[in-house]
Amino acid sequence: MITIFGGKSRFVDCPFCLKKFSKEPTGTWILIYPGLVGCGKKCPLALEALRRFKERFPEIQTSFYFLVTDPSESEEAIAAYLDYYQKSIQIKALRPETEEEISFYRKLGAYMPIHPSLKQRDEHGTQFFLVPPNRDTMYLIPKLGEKEWIDIQKEIETEIQ
């Protein structure tokens, strides 16, 4: 179920986040961007937004993931694509491992092409997914900036109270 909270961000219960990100240190926020390997339009802008976020909020313990939306991508192609960005931000590739994960990300709006020719259309979203340290929810964030981060923190604090 996707919930609109305060009319700003949406969040959903994440049934696999606790297990999927169990190796991340306690207190780490996880930012995920779903993209296409080889994309030269939206993905570079989104990855730059992640770099700026880390630069603006160095005190926040974060891990960054590039959700590989095409299951046919080779490990070599993924590594080559992310190599350039890893010079300025530590970002890891994230591959959905189960049909449950693929279906979950699709419901959130991640463009995950079923047929290889669809990848060529380069029609994927620009939203980010944020997993808080408790790992039980995932927030959908259309833009990643200071205002959005402050809004998310307020929403989480309100939810906890």
Image (cartoon, rainbow, N blue to C red):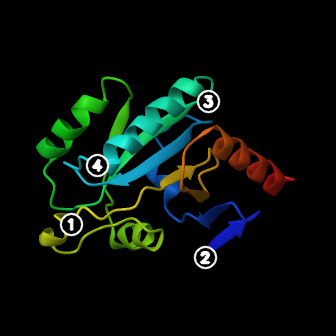
Asked if disc 1 and disc 3 are in contact, CB closer than 8 Å, the reply is no
| Amino acid marked by disc 4 | Lys
Using the numbered discs, state the Cα–Cα distance from disc 1 to disc 4 in whole angstroms.
12 Å
**Residue 115 image point, x, y percent:** 16, 74
Asked if disc 1 and disc 4 are in contact, CB closer than 8 Å, the reply is no
| Amino acid marked by disc 3 | Ile
Residue 1: image tag:
2
Classify residue 31 as left or right of residue 78.
right
Mark 1 or mark 3, whichever is nearer to me:
1
Residue 41: image tag:
4
Identified at 30% across, 55% down, the residue is 95
Using the numbered discs, state the Cα–Cα distance from disc 1 to disc 2 in whole angstroms.
29 Å
Tell which circle, 3 or 2, labels the residue nearer the N-terminal end: 2
Tell which circle, 4 or 2, labels the residue nearer the N-terminal end: 2
Is 22 located above or below residue 4 in the figure?
above
Mark 3 or mark 4, whichever is nearer to me:
4
